[in-house]
Amino acid sequence: MLISVAIATYNRASMAAEAIGAALDQSLAPGEVIVADDASTDSTAQVLEELRAQDGRVRVIRQQSNTGGVRNWNRAMEAATGEFIAWCSDDDRFLPGHLAASVQYLKANPSVGFVHSGFVDSIETAEGTVRQPRTLRSQQATRLTHEDLFTYLLCYYDWPFHPSTIVMRREVWRQVGPFDPRYELADTDWFVRAVSQYPAVLLPRHGVLNRRHAGNWSNRVGSACMQAEIFAIVDRAMLRRWPHASVSRMVWRTLWSLNVRLRLALTIRARLRSGHQAAALAAWDSFTELVGRPLPAWARRAGAAVIRRWPTGQVGEAGQTSVSPL
């Protein structure tokens, strides 16, 4: 079997069906599409069973109880039997030619462990859907190794990769290991660990449709929590890279801390401007924890008081249905 597609889902019957359909319709057809259902309580189980009956390539795994997400991701990936494995979130969709272009590059470049690519945002609100292709970072395939990983993460902090565009060799999954359930951003932690062991290549093409909608996981987690996790993931990677105290470790950890602090400050400003005071407070809480050592209690209280009194205006309907991470 050449390629497996792994999808994990929970309570997204229609979206998961569309993700499966886009995978099955690829010009390079997958040998199997594995769907792990995390004990959904809606019609997901019925929809998946109907798809399985229609196409034998669809394999359904149903968890007996809800695992919380990441363990279900691992269940889908571990069931894959193909030479190559493509990951897809249940609310994204492969664009035409995604699997063919990815596998073709991997077969032509045996030293590369996995590839990823650009994506097209599909912004879905009550007013309709708008597609916005993200600008490609290069017109040529861009190779990333452990030597330039931290520089890359500093440059592309907001979107170092899109998980639904990753196509990997099966041996990479075996060697790097599963997603770590300690993290909400387990895919980011996996990406950092994987690049530490295998070269990765960003392909100069749009691979998936990235659906932005009110039910996005990132909206639930929030940008402040996400940035705190990213800080911890990369900081621990630096400690693995330089396990003993050195100038290199000190410089890179300082640069990374300054970078995350700047991003959190920008998040606070953006949330105040958009009227999301609670989100601004969450970003402030994360900021106070990432300044080398926690700020004194009086400084935390003072900052929170300023945010609460800031004239943010009212969050209108557009703010309430925002599909951007808060």
Image: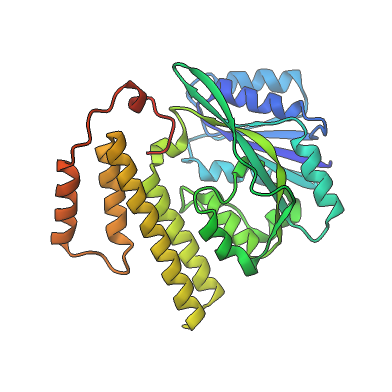
Describe residue 189's horizontal placement relative to residue 302 as left or right.
right
Q: Can residue 44 be seen in this view?
A: no
Of 315 and 59, the residue lying toward us = 315
Residue at the outermost right position: 108
Is residue 267 shown left or right of residue 25? left
Residue at horizontal 60%, vertical 44%? 163
Q: Percent position (x, y) of residue 203?
A: 72, 47
Residue 281: x, y in percent? 25, 46
Picture coordinates of residue 14, whole percent (x, y): 57, 20
Q: In which quarter of the image is the C terminus?
A: top left
Figure quadrant of residue 151:
bottom right
Residue 226 seen in the current view: yes
Q: Residue at x 65, y 43 (%)?
A: 136
Q: Residue 285: where, in percent of width, then height?
A: 27, 52
Question: Is 286 placed left or right of 194 in the picture?
Answer: left
Q: Quadrant of residue 29?
A: top right
Give the tally of numbered discs. Answer: 0
The residue closer to the viewer here, 221 or 313, is 313
- Split into 4 quadrants, where in the image is the N terminus? top right
Relative to 162, say whether 228 is above or below: below
Identify which residue is drawn at 69% across, 20% down.
51
Q: Which colour scheme is used?
A: rainbow
Residue at position x 81%, y 38% in the image: 100
Closer to us: 83 or 95: 95
